[in-house]
Image (cartoon, rainbow, N blue to C red):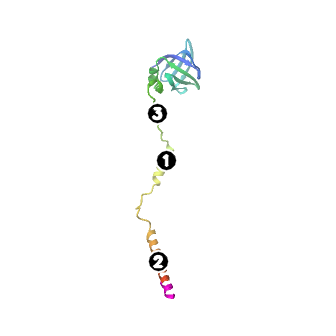
Amino acid sequence: MTKTFTGDVLLPGDAGSGLAATLSLDPEWVTLTAGDNQLGTWSRDDYVITPQKNGSFNLTLGGESVLFRPDSPSEFSSVSAVPLAGSLSGRFEEPAMPVPTSTSSEDDFLDAVVADVRPMRNPLDDGGISRTFVAVMLIVTVVLSVAAVVTASLV
């Protein structure tokens, strides 16, 4: 279903009223007409619509950019599924963050990481290190004690 919008077209950086134009949108094509002259028709893959201030929309058509100010920005916004920029809608809407999509290599990496996770062991089990430490300290204490007794007896 084709929906047609009237408005003005300006080149980037231009000020003023612009050129009266008609923009026709359908699910697969966008057509820009000024007066009786068709300026071009672009397929879905060749155009991008982004909101600008004051009810304007930047149209990137086949790599070229123009500013389109529709006569009815809210209707154009709803039909094109492009939200209005904050200044006209009365509130600032953060652009939606893209949802990351998982790729096969990411899935393989995550599977490998999960497979490499070892079960948690008992935090009190130190592998016998504490027993060895205690034994060594006991021997050192005995040796120093014997040395102290021998030294005292010789004095």
Whole-percent x, y for residue 144 in the image: 49, 79
Q: Which residues are magenta?
A: 149-155
Q: Distance between the Cα atoms at labels 1 and 3?
A: 28 Å
The residue at 53%/17% (across/down) is 8
Number of labelled discs?
Answer: 3
Amino acid bearing label 3: Ala
In the rendered image, the vertical position of residue 96 relative to residue 72, given as above or below: below
Q: Is residue 82 visible?
A: no
Amino acid bearing label 1: Asp
**Residue tagged 1:** 108
Whole-percent x, y for residue 77 in the image: 46, 23
Amino acid bearing label 2: Thr
Q: Distance between the Cα atoms at labels 1 and 2?
A: 56 Å
The residue most toward the front is 155
In-image side of 91 versus 65 (left or right): left
Disc nearer the start of the sequence (3/2) = 3
Q: Main secondary structure of the magenta part?
A: helix
Circles 3, 2 touching at the beta carbon (< 8 Å): no
In the rendered image, the vertical position of residue 75 relative to residue 146, given as above or below: above
Q: Secondary structure at mark 2?
A: helix
Q: Which mark is residue 141?
A: 2
Q: Distance between the Cα atoms at labels 3 and 2?
A: 69 Å
Whole-percent x, y for residue 50 in the image: 51, 27
Q: Secondary structure at mark 3?
A: loop
**Residue tagged 3:** 96
Disc nearer the start of the sequence (1/3) = 3
